[in-house]
Image: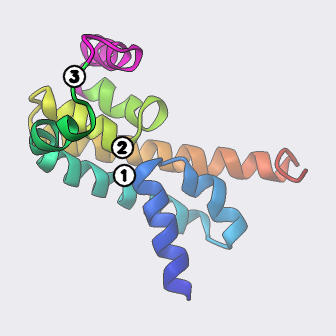
Amino acid sequence: MEILKYLSLFLMACFKSVLPALVGPFSGFTKLEIILITILGLMTSTVVFTFLGEKIKRHIIPLFIRKPKRFSRKSRRMVRVWKGYGIAGTCFLTPVILSPPIGALLISTMGAPKRKVFLYMLFSGIFWGISWTYSLGWLVKMGLFNG
């Protein structure tokens, strides 16, 4: 049963990396476990979606979007982030603005070198995992989430 707790927190981290910091303390995880699971989930999404990015763009997305719009609000925001901040900035902002899968897809379809993407996403995951775990833990201690 313990493995299911770890697996569920890991899957949350794969899709939105702030979730382990929100859910982890209430599920009995230590700060170190939360940070490591956050980083592992973010990096798993990054690896999977970076390697599959072009295939997803070419084969999967057209199944759901028949006639793509020229520009949507979301696509404009993604392009603005990419043009304004480059690879490093996009990787840094991915956990906050986007999600690991969407950020990795965006970065990979823009042709960024995979080695840089993995390195920057790792640094981003470490930074945000530690920041969220400690800041949200502090807010819980202050009574913000105690209802």
Q: Is residue 55 left or right of residue 123?
A: left
Circle 3 SS class: loop
Q: Which residue is mark 3?
A: 67
Q: Amino acid at mark 3?
A: Lys
Q: Is residue 99 left or right of residue 116?
A: right
Name the N-terminal-most of marks 1 and 3. 1
Q: Amino acid at mark 1?
A: Leu
Q: How dense is the environment of label 2, judged by Cα within 10 Å: few (below 14), some, or many (20 and up)?
A: many
Where are the magenta residues, as a range? Answer: 69-87
Percent x, y for residue 60?
A: 18, 44
Identify which residue is drawn at 27% across, 19% down: 82
Percent x, y for residue 34?
A: 54, 62
Q: Which residue is mark 1?
A: 42
Is 36 a magenta residue? no
Task: Give the quadrant of the N terminus.
Answer: bottom right
Residue depth check, mark 1 versus mark 3: number of the one nearer the observer: 3
Percent x, y for residue 137?
A: 71, 52
Q: CA distance from mark 2 to mark 3?
A: 25 Å
Circle 1 SS class: helix
Q: Is residue 107 left or right of residue 141?
A: left
Q: How dense is the environment of label 3, judged by Cα within 10 Å: few (below 14), some, or many (20 and up)?
A: few
Percent x, y for residue 47?
A: 21, 53
Q: CA distance from mark 2 to mark 1?
A: 6 Å
The image's mark for residue 100 is 2
Q: CA distance from mark 1 to mark 3?
A: 31 Å
Q: Nearer the viewer, residue 47 or 86?
A: 47
Compared with 38, 92 (above or below) is above
Is 85 a magenta residue? yes
Q: How dense is the environment of label 1, judged by Cα within 10 Å: few (below 14), some, or many (20 and up)?
A: many
